[in-house]
């Protein structure tokens, strides 16, 4: 039996500092094919955290992989939406998380309890924390190897950082370590937004598996608590 926790937004903000992941890269790993590995272990026990005070969807306007303006609130209004902040040069948690979501999305297509319209309504949004390197073209190439339907967004770092902070997710500007490797420290949470209220009401940590997302997505698509 999977356990669910209910937290206030304030409690989540307080805990965010402890859920950061430092990701580094040396020889431009983001320029090749993304890591096509997913976590398959069922029932990690660390799954959806239902918030009793949902986050407001960020008023975030950035540029998508086609070079067009993308207004997060307007273009995901009344649609079940999963948002993740990361970057394409990340060697581990970012590609793992996005692959998990992509595989779960494919598994969801088999769910006979959902209409095709409901399945098509799901939006997965990847917001880069490294916009200097993650141009629209770079994001598009990276996401093509995971799921071309995932929305990739880039723009000013300050804009991205402010949006992440409004969701209790901490990110820091990319920096070089003593070996010259670029390190990006960022929260690894996935936030699910309800199609009924447009509020961010479920949070997933980096240990969420394909199985976890596959089980929860039908309820999230309907705006129900997983």
Image (tube, rainbow, N blue to C red):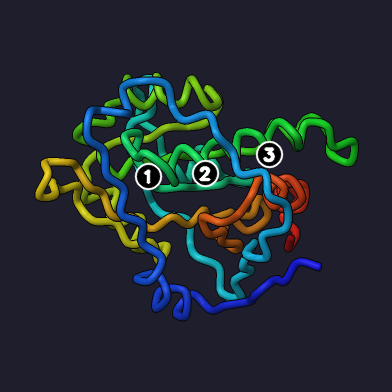
Badge 3 density bin: few <14, some 14–19, many ≥20, Cα 10 Å: many
Badge 2 density bin: few <14, some 14–19, many ≥20, Cα 10 Å: many
Residue sitting at x 37%, y 44% = 86
- Per the image, label 3 sits on a secondary structure element best described as helix
Q: Label 1: which residue?
A: 86
Q: Earlier in the sequence, mark 1 or mark 3?
A: 1
Residue sitting at x 90%, y 36% = 112
Badge 1 density bin: few <14, some 14–19, many ≥20, Cα 10 Å: many
Q: Nearer the viewer, residue 1 or 16?
A: 1
- The label nearer to you, 2 versus 1, is 2
Q: Quadrant of the N terminus?
A: bottom right
Q: Label 3: which residue?
A: 104
Q: Nearer the viewer, residue 37 or 74?
A: 37
The percent position of residue 98, horizontal first and vertical second, equals 52, 38
Q: Residue furthest front?
A: 179
The percent position of residue 165, horizontal first and vertical second, equals 34, 62
Q: Is residue 116 above or below residue 221?
A: above
Q: Is residue 110 left or right of residue 77?
A: right
- Per the image, label 2 sits on a secondary structure element best described as helix
Residue sitting at x 37%, y 47% = 60
Q: Earlier in the sequence, mark 2 or mark 1?
A: 1
- Per the image, label 1 sits on a secondary structure element best described as strand
Q: Are marks 2 and 3 in contact (CB under 8 Å)?
A: no
Q: Is residue 8 above or below residue 165?
A: below
Q: Label 2: which residue?
A: 97
Q: Earlier in the sequence, mark 2 or mark 3?
A: 2
Give the quadrant of residue 162. Answer: bottom left
Q: Are marks 2 and 1 in contact (CB under 8 Å)?
A: yes
């Amino acid at each position: 039996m999977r356990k669910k926790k209910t937290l206030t937004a304030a409690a989540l903000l307080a805990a965010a500092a402890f859920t950061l992941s430092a990701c580094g890269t040396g020889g431009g790993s983001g320029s090749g094919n993304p890591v096509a590995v997913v976590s398959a272990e069922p029932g990690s026990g660390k799954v959806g955290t239902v918030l009793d005070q949902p986050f407001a969807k960020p008023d975030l306007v950035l540029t998508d992989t086609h070079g067009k303006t993308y207004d997060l609130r307007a273009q995901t209004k009344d649609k079940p939406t999963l948002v993740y902040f990361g970057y394409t040069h990340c060697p581990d948690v970012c590609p793992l998380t996005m692959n998990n979501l992509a595989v779960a999305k494919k598994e969801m297509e088999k769910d006979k309890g959902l209409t095709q319209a409901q399945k098509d309504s799901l939006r997965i949004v990847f917001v880069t924390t490294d916009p200097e390197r993650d141009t629209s073209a770079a994001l598009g190439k990276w996401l093509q190897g995971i799921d071309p339907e995932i929305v990739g967004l880039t723009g000013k770092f300050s804009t991205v950082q402010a949006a992440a902070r409004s969701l209790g997710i901490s990110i820091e500007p990319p920096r070089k370590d003593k070996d010259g490797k670029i390190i990006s420290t960022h929260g690894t949470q996935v936030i699910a937004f309800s199609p009924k209220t447009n509020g961010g009401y479920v949070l997933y940590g980096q240990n969420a598996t394909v199985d976890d997302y596959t089980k929860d997505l039908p309820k999230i698509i309907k705006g129900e608590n997983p």
